[in-house]
Every structure is written in C-alpha cells, then in structure tokens.
C-alpha cells in the first residue's frame, strides 16, 4: 500500500492512496485540473481512480467532487449527511447513481482496499475519517477533528502509517488576527487539533509497527510548517524514548503540491 498527499490545508485537501491494484482519493477539495496535475506528477491518472471517499462537506474537501462525478464518472462514498450536502452544494446537479452511502464503523471493501469510516468531532453535516487496510498493512487518518477520544484511538490503533492533523499553534491562534468567535471555533471540540494535541495523539498510538507520520491541514495563519514538525517530533520522540520504540519518520504535507509517495 502507498499514499501521497496532493494538497493539504484550508485551501484544499486531497489524498491519493493505492492498495494493491485499487487506487482511490480521500477528499477532493481542489480542482480536477490540480488533481490531474498532482496525479501526473506521481505517474498516475484519474482514469485509474476507482472512487473518492469524502470526509465531510466543507468546501476545502469537496470542491472538485461534482466535476469528478460528472466528467470522470468517479463514484463518491460518504455518509448520508455529507452526500446530501454535496448534492445541495452543486447547482448543475450531481449524478445520484454515483453516490454510495457509508455507515460509520462499518467496513466497506473496494477492490483490494478495506476502508472503515469512523466518526470525528467537527462542525460539519456528518463527518468521518477513515482507516484503510490492505493485507496486514494499515493507514490511519485523523484530520478535521477538534478532539480525539478513546474511540478515535481504537480506530487508529496498530497503524503502519498515520495521516494526522497538526492544524495550529494555540498561542499563534489566540494572539492572531482571526475574529474571537472563529478562534473559539477552531480551538473547540468541533474545530481542529493543535500541534500539541496531534503530538499527544501520535504518542498514544506508538507501536513498533508505526513507521511514518504525515502532518496535514497546517494553518497558513496560525502555524508554521517547521513549528508543527518540531512540536510533534519532540513529543513523539520523548514518548518513543520512554517506550523503547524507534521514532517514526515524520513528514509534512504541502499546502499546494504533492508529496513524495510513501509505501507501507
């Protein structure tokens, strides 16, 4: 199994994943043109994408979804609330026959990929994140959530790789220019994980199996790439030292460009 971030942040999110012979996208919050360009950079094509799994209905996760469906006939999988929101957001109309409803905690099999949606705490219609399995390999995703719980950790447990949110530095957020209510929303249980919360979550998930951690959805206004990397690396490094584990490779997803391909 391999994965690659095509874009990550409030300007748009899209993750490419291939399990065996089955290639899918997780979210399509950038234009189809940018998705095509990102896939071309890694030697892939939209023609080979079997489906798009959507986490929630915010525009930075669904911007390209209607065109993916209409022009490329790519099926979309999401919860009932998210599918309804996608349909309502598009004035030209999306092909309903390409919409497939997911139920949280119920695994679906698509080709070689076994994908399980699980609920997250975020201010969206019916949000989920995903874990993806292929054989004995597992990728765990945790983005756009204001808090993590034992339920979250249970779904992410024993991952070989994690794609996780390190959205903001709390001091930068609270001292920044955002309106007060927006600051409260971001820092609430329905908002986004801070660097510290991300580090603590990853530290709780450390096992000898965990080899790669990709930090995603980093705020352009309330964070720095280097700060997110350093904060999470320190917390995870200290936890790994205490447990006697190898420190996983920690990388940062770019806001606009695709990352390298990482294999699990």
Image: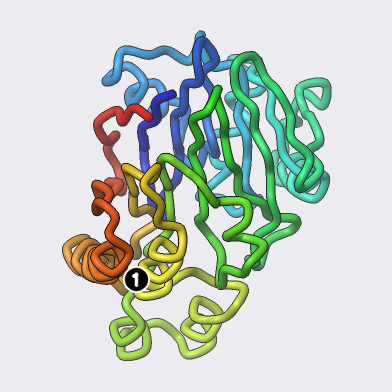
Residue at horizontal 33 percent and vertical 64 percent from the top: 243
Furthest residue in direction front, as rendered: 244
Residue at horizontal 72 percent and vertical 31 percent from the top: 92
Any part of residue 220 in sight? no
Residue at horizontal 34 percent and vertical 27 percent from the top: 263
Q: Quadrant of the N terminus?
A: top left
- State the residue in front, 220 or 241: 241
Looking at the image, residue 199 sits to the left or right of residue 134; the answer is: left
| Residue identifier under label 1 | 195
- State the residue in front, 180 or 78: 78
Q: Quadrant of the C terminus?
A: top left
- State the residue in front, 31 or 118: 118
Residue at horizontal 60 percent and vertical 23 percent from the top: 113
Quadrant in the picture for residue 239 = bottom left
Q: Position of residue 146 (x, y in %)?
A: 55, 71
- Work out whether 42 lies above or below 133: above
Quadrant in the picture for residue 117 = top right
């Amino acid at each position: 199994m391999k994965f690659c971030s095509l874009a990550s942040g409030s300007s748009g999110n899209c993750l490419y994943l291939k399990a065996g012979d089955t290639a899918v996208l997780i979210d399509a919050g950038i234009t189809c043109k940018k998705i095509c360009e990102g896939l071309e950079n890694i030697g892939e094509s939209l023609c080979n994408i079997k489906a798009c799994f959507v986490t929630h209905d915010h525009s930075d996760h669904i911007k390209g979804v209607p065109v993916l469906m209409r022009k490329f006939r790519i099926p979309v999988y999401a919860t009932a609330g998210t599918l309804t929101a996608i349909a309502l957001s598009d004035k030209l109309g999306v092909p309903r026959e390409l919409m497939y409803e997911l139920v949280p905690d119920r695994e679906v099999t698509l080709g070689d990929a076994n994908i399980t949606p699980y609920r997250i705490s975020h201010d969206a219609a019916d949000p989920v994140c995903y874990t993806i399995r292929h054989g004995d390999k597992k990728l765990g995703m945790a983005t756009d959530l204001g808090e993590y719980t034992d339920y979250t950790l249970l779904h992410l447990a024993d991952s070989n790789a994690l794609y996780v949110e390190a959205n903001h530095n709390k001091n930068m957020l609270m001292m920044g220019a955002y309106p007060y209510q927006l600051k409260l929303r971001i820092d609430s249980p329905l908002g986004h994980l801070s660097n510290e919360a991300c580090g603590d979550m990853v530290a709780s998930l450390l096992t000898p199996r965990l080899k790669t951690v990709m930090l995603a959805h980093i705020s352009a206004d309330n964070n720095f790439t280097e700060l997110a990397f350093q904060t999470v690396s320190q917390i995870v490094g200290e936890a790994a030292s205490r447990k006697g584990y190898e420190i996983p490779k920690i990388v940062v997803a770019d806001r606009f460009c695709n990352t390298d391909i990482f294999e699990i």
